[in-house]
Image (tube, rainbow, N blue to C red):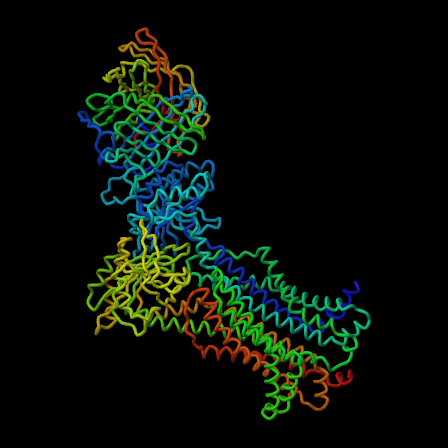
């Protein structure tokens, strides 16, 4: 009990006397915790619970059979005839867009004859399974009708409704023949008989997937082996839903980086707690001395201060929980956007606030608070009663350690440089993070020396410039160097993060813009209407592509065909192009630096491919290596002719000549077209011509400029979450400044009271505080900018490269940086307004009376 | 004659196809083998029907049934992609563990698809998934896989196929075309193995095969039928069926075939034999239908009198859809006499229309 009483008297009571300051600290912790929690929750929802949308109607199947470009359909017959008791469920799968709502949904073609009968058979024993399918009677009745579709109930249709569907570049009318329930967390989908799906998608000769249910004995591995023996070389057998795991693996680096980014707010928060407890220790030095003199043990003092921090942490974390849950809503949307445009189409799952995530949030809130409070609390415990009751030595320690800390900072800086050269571990840039952490630590240690140097410089200059109040402000900051350093450390960390990410994103954006100039040589681009996605590739009818070639004003039409494949257990894109470079680009887009004609000639004349930079990074391959691809029923080996820079997607891309790919996968329909307008013809004229020719097809047409604008728009949307995280960290930093200045004012009430007593006007006191805030801002901005520059190098050349494999050219995004820094600077000064008001309201008489 | 119900049920579910698209069974049809062992796409309905009685060396008796049905759905010349449904292929599989007192049955429905089901002369195979008959040097190799049991049997024809009816048609009702083309292998020496719940039995015995194809066959006042295949101890065989009317009378187109030891067949008209159900009945716990499981057969012109009983009363196949009626199809044992000489045998009995009248008209 006495210890609790001590805790209450020494620490809790003062808090009530300074509610604003206490609130600011708690809020800072709350924001930090909220951001971490929000990213964690949103990450789980947007990527963790990720399930390929094609799994919607997958039942209890064990294995799936896939092949690039589709499984040859004869494989279905082969599997069905195997002398094993296995259930074989072929699927023709793609996406369809409901014309009315523009909603893109999985289109699942299943064998309603066989599956309808099978599920009807099991209906008596397992109604739940049976009822999720179109009923057998219905499916038989409309078996011959190729316009029959079954839809899930959440889409709001009823039997007999007409439904316009956009499939590839064609819109057709379908009739809803039945509704199946999709309530239990299942995604909406459109179901057709496999024959109808085959015609709708003109996918003849191949199915997309074959699902298998095998007996429990002798185990999945054995079954996989047995089945593989019965299948052609290019066809894969893998556990059903393996695609989901592959996607998860692909998204791991993205989630990991986002999570670490979210911790930055927490680091900023840690600085603030450290500062708050330091202030608390310094201010109560005398009380601590008295309590110690009265017999309190050192440990009791330590516990009291750590306890104070823990309370801040707990209160902050408790506030952070609902806040984080709320922020997760927005974060999920932003993250889902990024996932969709860079990785894979998926819809985010529900946000689930689990017991473990609550525990996690509380633990980091309290943990960070306790860790950052430990050092000042220990210092409080170390003070000897006599020393504490005397005054004037409080800043001594910091001054003494300034030089030592600076050299320590240099050592850490060197260590950071060394760590940044180390390779990734298991695909994660662990040493990159270490380098970043070392750099932040080095900055924190270097800041006292930095601040001291700058303050002693400024106190000489500033008096002449801004008057005596400014000089007082500068000297006051230099005098309380520890506090100043901690504040500058907190804000500069936030600024450094903002700057570094700003530089990284700005450089990235600039790199993409430059790259697009070379990459998009055609004048007009066509692709099927519907929602674009990185992992599905609707096609344009071949006859349309051929017709366009003959139009007047069209010089040439380049056809691109893309397939979604799995390479080495990670999703990738396989594409084919017409290897004829119509227009030379100024710069080579290849690692080798060779001109595009030369590389394309190699593609045309040999069994060679080019791969994107992220592909080489993910699969550890380089130019001249060989890669083996499963294509249709065959397996073929290709030489990597060159590596090209690619920023369109984080997934790896393999490109080969159109003729090469057609040898393996004979579907000639292109996924997109690039139209070259003949010299001397207006693009708009040709565009009108193309639109007329494409009447009846649902095609989107982009001019070269449209496409670039679209790409940049997607790019900016992709990094929205990054900006949001930065903003929160800066808000936490600025709040810290406000809180610290407030503490400063309260701490210096005697001094300020004395100034007032000696005749200082209220305006002068206000100016004094505001100049302090401004000086803190300058210090933090300068320190943050330097630190941010160094961090951006680590981000661009180490963390980004090792996580995603992109080569980014360094670029200063001056406008963005200047704008952001100005806002932060203004915010810092504004943060001084309230403390200044408090200082002005001090009653000088009362203060002097105390003295 | 075996008008298989599942087929008809399926025909009722799909939009009534134009019968005019298909050929009907008319007198004078010229059979040709092996062509006529396989599919006849121009007829609407077709089936291949294997039943048999076998036993293991230690005397454990089994009966089995494996049937393949083909029901034409569409002959649209525009729909010829792999998954387009031109025919529905249904199949029924049953195993009667006569000494174990258990009856197992299952069924499947498929389209031809990319090699999922069919009856192809070029590869000598009639199949539905992994249930198949593979012709191999004149023998028929039967394989059927179920999760509870597996059949692997070799069927060796001891007699040439018999053509039922007169002039190549087995008439089923009044009017031209209300008939089928109907052949049987009446005595197939059978050997192979049966695996049942992890236990394997080597078995030997005799099987019977029916193959019938037709379009639009029966009358609407015909409500059900009883059909038997009998393999007698003196190396002769009998096939008999009668069609029952709503009013309980027996249809005059009921008929039969007698095959002598040399394989020569004789057509039996309805008034050549009597097929009489006796008192003993078996009530199905699933469909509540009551089946007569004890029959008396008298064929005066062959001086044959036979008593038909079954070693396992529960051999009812219940359909998996509300549209498909149930039927009883099971192994039977025969005792009796011919010209005062004792005569025994085995066979299969099929009884339909006992749970409810079979609606045959589309």
| A729 horizontally vs B191: left or right | right
Q: Residue furthest top?
A: B340
The residue lying toward the viewer, choosing from B23 and B332, is B332
Residue drawn at (48%, 67%) of the image: A799
- Whole-percent x and y of residue A530? 35, 59
- Locate residue B148 relative to residue A275 in the image: left or right: left
The quadrant in which the N terminus of chain B is found is: top left
Decide if residue A341 is in sight here: no
Residue, far right: A294
In percent of width and height, residue B151 lies at 37, 29
On screen, residue A356 versus residue A429, left or right, reads: right
Give the number of marks. Answer: 0
Q: Quadrant of the C terminus of chain B?
A: top left
Q: Does the image show residue B85? A: yes
**Residue occupying image coordinates x 30% and y 74%:** A586
**Residue B301: image x %, image y %?**
26, 10
Judge from the rendering whether residue A397 lies leftward or rightward of residue A559; answer left or right: right
Residue A386 image position (x, y, % from top left) = 79, 77
The one nearer the camera, A48 or B301, is A48
């Amino acid at each position: 009990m006495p210890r609790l009483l001590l805790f209450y008297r020494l620490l809790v009571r003062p808090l009530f006397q300074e509610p604003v300051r206490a609130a600011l600290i708690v809020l800072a912790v709350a924001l930090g915790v909220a951001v971490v929690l929000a990213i964690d929750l949103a990450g789980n929802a947007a990527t963790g619970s990720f399930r390929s949308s094609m799994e919607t109607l997958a039942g209890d199947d064990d294995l799936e059979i896939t092949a690039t470009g589709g499984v040859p359909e004869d494989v279905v017959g082969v599997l069905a005839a195997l002398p094993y008791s296995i259930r074989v469920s072929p699927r023709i799968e793609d996406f369809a867009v409901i014309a009315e709502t523009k909603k893109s949904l999985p289109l699942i073609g299943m064998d309603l004859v066989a599956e309808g009968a099978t599920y009807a058979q099991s209906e008596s024993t397992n109604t739940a399974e049976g009822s999720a399918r179109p009923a057998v009677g219905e499916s038989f009745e409309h078996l011959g009708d190729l316009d029959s579709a079954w839809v899930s109930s959440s889409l709001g249709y009823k039997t007999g409704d007409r439904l316009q569907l956009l499939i590839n570049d064609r819109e057709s009318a379908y009739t809803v023949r039945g509704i199946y329930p999709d309530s239990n967390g299942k995604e909406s989908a459109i179901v057709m008989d496999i024959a109808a799906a085959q015609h709708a998608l003109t996918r003849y000769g191949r199915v997309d997937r074959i699902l298998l249910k095998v007996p429990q004995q002798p185990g999945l591995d054995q079954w996989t082996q047995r089945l593989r023996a019965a299948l052609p070389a290019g066809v894969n057998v893998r556990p059903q839903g393996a695609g989901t795991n592959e996607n998860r693996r692909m998204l791991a680096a993205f989630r990991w980086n986002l999570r670490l980014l979210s911790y930055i707010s927490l680091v900023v928060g840690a600085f603030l707690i450290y500062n708050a407890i330091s202030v608390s220790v310094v201010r109560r030095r005398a009380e601590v001395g008295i309590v110690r003199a009265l017999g309190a043990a050192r440990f009791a003092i330590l516990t009291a201060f750590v306890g104070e921090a823990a309370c801040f942490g707990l209160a902050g974390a408790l506030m952070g929980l609902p806040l984080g849950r709320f922020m997760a809503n927005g974060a999920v949307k932003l993250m889902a956007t990024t996932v969709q445009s860079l990785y894979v189409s998926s819809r985010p799952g529900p946000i689930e606030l689990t017991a473990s995530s609550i525990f996690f949030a509380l633990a980091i809130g309290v943990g960070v608070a306790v860790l950052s409070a430990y050092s000042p609390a220990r210092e409080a415990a170390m003070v000897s009663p006599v020393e504490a009751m005397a005054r004037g030595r409080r800043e001594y320690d910091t001054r003494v350690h300034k030089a030592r800390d600076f050299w320590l900072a240099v050592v850490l800086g060197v260590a950071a440089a060394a760590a940044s050269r180390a390779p990734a571990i298991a695909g994660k840039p662990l040493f990159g993070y270490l380098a970043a952490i070392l750099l932040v630590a080095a900055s924190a240690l270097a800041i006292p020396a930095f601040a001291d140097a700058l303050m002693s410089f400024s106190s000489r200059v500033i008096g002449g410039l801004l008057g005596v109040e400014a000089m007082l402000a500068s000297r006051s900051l230099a005098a309380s160097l520890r506090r100043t350093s901690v504040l500058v450390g907190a804000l500069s960390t936030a600024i450094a993060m903002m700057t570094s990410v700003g530089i990284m994103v700005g450089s990235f954006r600039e790199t993409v813009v430059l790259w697009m100039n070379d990459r998009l040589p055609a004048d007009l681009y066509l692709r099927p209407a519907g929602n674009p996605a990185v992992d599905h590739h609707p096609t344009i009818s071949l006859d349309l592509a051929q017709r366009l070639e003959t139009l007047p004003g069209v010089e040439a039409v380049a056809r691109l065909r893309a397939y979604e494949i799995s390479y080495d257990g990670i999703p990738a894109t396989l594409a084919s192009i017409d290897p004829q470079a119509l227009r030379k680009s100024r710069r080579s887009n290849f690692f080798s630096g060779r001109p595009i004609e030369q590389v394309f000639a190699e593609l045309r004349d040999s069994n060679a491919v080019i791969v994107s930079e992220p592909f080489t990074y993910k699969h550890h391959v380089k130019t001249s290596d060989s890669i083996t691809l499963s294509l249709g029923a065959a397996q073929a080996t290709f030489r990597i002719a060159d590596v090209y820079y690619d920023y369109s997607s984080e997934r790896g891309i393999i490109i080969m000549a159109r003729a090469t790919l057609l040898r393996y996968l004979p579907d000639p329909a292109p996924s997109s077209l690039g139209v070259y307008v003949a010299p001397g013809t207006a693009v708009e004229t040709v565009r009108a011509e193309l639109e007329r020719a494409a009447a009846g097809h649902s095609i989107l047409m982009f001019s070269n400029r449209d496409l670039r604008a679209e790409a940049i728009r997607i790019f900016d949307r992709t990094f929205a979450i990054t900006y949001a995280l930065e903003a929160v960290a800066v808000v936490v930093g600025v709040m810290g400044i406000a809180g610290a200045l407030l503490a400063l004012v309260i701490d210096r009430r005697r001094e300020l009271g004395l100034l007032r007593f000696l005749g200082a006007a209220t305006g002068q006191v206000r100016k004094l505080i505001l100049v302090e805030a401004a000086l803190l801002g300058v210090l933090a901005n300068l320190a943050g900018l330097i630190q941010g520059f160094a961090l951006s190098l680590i981000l661009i050349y180490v963390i980004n490269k090792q996580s995603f494999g992109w080569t980014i050219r360094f670029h200063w995004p001056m406008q963005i940086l200047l704008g952001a820094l100005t806002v932060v600077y203004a915010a810092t000064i504004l943060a001084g307004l309230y403390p200044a008001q408090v200082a002005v309201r001090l009653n000088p008489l009362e203060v002097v009376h105390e003295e | 004659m075996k008008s298989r119900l599942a087929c008809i049920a399926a025909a009722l579910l799909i939009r009534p196809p134009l019968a005019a698209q298909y050929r009907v069974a008319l007198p004078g049809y010229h059979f040709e083998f092996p062509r006529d062992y396989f599919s006849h796409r121009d007829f609407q309905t077709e089936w291949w029907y294997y039943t048999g009685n076998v036993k293991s060396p230690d005397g454990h008796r089994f009966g089995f049934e494996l049937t393949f049905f083909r029901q034409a759905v569409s002959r649209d010349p525009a729909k010829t992609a792999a998954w387009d449904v031109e025919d529905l292929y249904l199949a029924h599989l049953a195993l009667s563990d006569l000494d174990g007192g258990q009856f197992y049955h299952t069924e499947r429905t498929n389209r031809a698809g990319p090699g999922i089901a069919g009856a192809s002369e070029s590869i000598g195979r009639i199949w539905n998934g992994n249930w198949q008959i593979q012709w191999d040097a004149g023998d028929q190799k039967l394989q059927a896989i179920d999760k509870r049991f597996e059949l692997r049997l070799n069927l060796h024809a001891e007699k040439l196929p018999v053509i039922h009816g007169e002039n190549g048609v087995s008439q089923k009702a009044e009017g031209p075309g209300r008939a089928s083309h109907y052949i049987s292998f009446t005595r197939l020496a059978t050997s192979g193995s049966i695996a049942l719940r992890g236990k394997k039995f080597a078995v030997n015995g005799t099987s019977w095969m029916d193959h019938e194809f037709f379009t639009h066959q029966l009358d609407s006042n015909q409500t059900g039928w009883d059909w038997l295949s009998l393999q007698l101890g003196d190396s002769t065989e009998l096939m008999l069926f009668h069609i029952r009317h709503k009013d309980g009378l027996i249809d005059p187109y009921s008929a039969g075939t007698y095959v002598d030891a040399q394989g020569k067949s004789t057509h039996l008209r309805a008034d050549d034999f009597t097929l009489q159900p006796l008192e003993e009945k078996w009530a199905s716990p699933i469909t509540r239908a009551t089946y007569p499981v004890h029959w008396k057969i008298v064929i005066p012109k062959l001086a044959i009198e036979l008593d038909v009983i079954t070693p396992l009363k529960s051999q009812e196949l219940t359909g998996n859809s509300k549209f498909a009626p149930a039927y009883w199809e099971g192994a039977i044992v025969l005792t009796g006499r011919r010209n005062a000489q004792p005569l025994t045998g085995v066979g299969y009995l099929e009884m339909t229309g006992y749970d409810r009248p079979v609606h045959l008209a589309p």
